[in-house]
Amino acid sequence: MLDFPFVKKRDPELSNTVTVETKKLNVHYGSSHALKNIDLTLYEKTITAFIGPSGCGKSTLLRCINRMNDTIANAKITGDILIDGVNIHADTIHATGLRKHVGMVFQKPNPFYKSIFENIAFALRIHQTPKKDIPVIVEDSLKRVGLWEEVKDRLHESALQLSGGQQQRLCIARTIAMNPSIILLDEPTSALDPISTEKIEKLLQTLKQDFTIVIVTHNMHQAARISDYTAYFHLGNMIEIGHTEQIFTTPAQTKTEDYLSGKFG
Amino acid sequence: MEKNEKTSLAVQLQTPAKRMFWMEWRGRSITYISVWIVILVLLSLLWFITSKGLQPFLNGEVTLSQFFSSNWNPQDNKFGSLYIMLGSFMVTICATIISAPLGISAAVFMTEIAPKWGKKVLQPTTEILVGIPSVVYGFIGLTLLVPFIGKFVGGVGFGLLAGTLVLSIMILPTIISISVDAIESVPQKYREGSYALGATRWQTIWRIVLKTALPGLMTAVVLGMARAFGEALAVQMVIGNVPNAPFDFFTSISTLTSMITQNMGNTVPSETFNQILWSMGLVLLLITLVFILLIRFITRRRDA
């Protein structure tokens, strides 16, 4: 029995609606086999955390879900990824349209070299949002990430003068401005201080009401605190996935237990 | 406890390494001397050109308003150089209008669209273009371009159009290579952020990459302009060298540089004409200075 005092208790009212499903997903980068036969199911309006040591494939899997791996020339992906039952590699699906529904936030905050307002407006303009709606959506998104009060007087100043935590919340704001159904976060707090991290963790709990959230994290305690489901990855295999409370108290696999108890990693 | 007992480490620590001091001193002296030589040479050049260039005005042979008028007739001691200066500006601006979009687009292709091919084929090609001496560009212009323009386009062939075309090719490599550096220095995380929002490649290039690289791109263009403004030989070979008003693409005109190269050998230092050439040199120097200040101003980031 593992001891994680802050582990999130199992929520009995979690949705059963499947949002993302991967079937026998394999990813090769050149000669290296980055993901092996992944069968994963993600449920609507839940938080799923991917944990595991470096190089285990958790970021690779995340980047498959919004097809960011398309930009890597030697990546070869086999198997199926279904979002709401639709195969995202089908000929009728364009990566740009897919990414509107599957937003992504990166490890290092990456606001553009533009004003705070324009950072969000950019996302809206590329998806042909009517001009008159843009200020409303910008304000709404900033409010939802709790940034509005901090920046409302300097919306037209450069986003690069915000603190790291504010920048990261701005990146989340521009993602939710597109009204996606899924948000992918790739170690979103690893470059941030503990206070900013806490703000973002709380924010994710609120966003969960509207979005399906997948978070890759290097910090297993973060996964224990915030996620409903946890998947443990090791060398390209998904060793185990389950309710966070179960994974962090009674993991089914010895490998998971060894990692969580600090035997390696 | 024994106080003055010296361990071997203590002895080592207290022994000054004379050789090290000597090497330090020598290294510092070499760099100091070099930098002072450079500063001295530059200052004396500036002093020389300025004093020479101001001479005709200080002697009262020509007034400033005469110099900046359009009345040019050296035989009659009329040295109004307005059209010559305007000629320099016109070829520079026209060449930049052609080269800037072409060069920046080529840089985008080399960095964003086909980086492998761009690096392997286009980069060396632009480097070769830089290496071609300006006299060769001028010679090609004179042999191919001037007769072609004279026969098929208009005029005798010499003039603003020929000068513009030759210059635009000459400054292209400058604009390309500096634009490539500017675009490559845009952090990859901006591109990823843009793609992750569902932007297409074109939207990412146009609204994120070029926008972020803008100060660098403007530097590229201004440096290209500076090069065009200062280029003498190739321009002189195709421009026609008659100080007409430079507002027609097909009449022969003059530029500051072409006027200097053409006449420096035909005049003697005591003549006013010769001194006026120095004044033109001074104008060139001042304009170039403006270009450099402009670059400084552009590259000073407006945030952080």
Image (cartoon, helix red, strand yellow):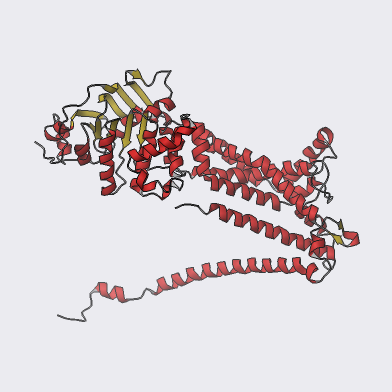
Q: Is residue A177 in view?
A: yes
Image label count: 0
- Is B105 situated left or right of B188 in this image? right
B116 or A147, nearer to the observer: A147
B132 or B51, nearer to the observer: B51
- Is B231 situated left or right of A224 in this image? right
Identify the residue at the far left of this view. A1
Query: Residue B273's spot in the image, x, y percent?
Result: 84, 62
B271 or B92, nearer to the observer: B92
Query: Residue B200's spot in the image, x, y percent?
Result: 48, 30
Q: Which quadrant holds residue B266?
A: bottom right
Q: Which quadrant holds residue A81?
A: top left
Position of the C terminus of chain A, as image quadrant, is top left
Query: Residue B172's spot in the image, x, y percent?
Result: 64, 43
Position of the N terminus of chain A, as image quadrant, is top left
Q: Residue at x 71, y 43 (%)?
A: B94
Identify the residue at the far right of this view. B76
Query: Residue B278's spot in the image, x, y percent?
Result: 76, 63
Q: Is residue B192 in view?
A: no
Q: Residue at x 56, y 67 (%)?
A: B35
Q: Residue at x 73, y 41 (%)?
A: B165
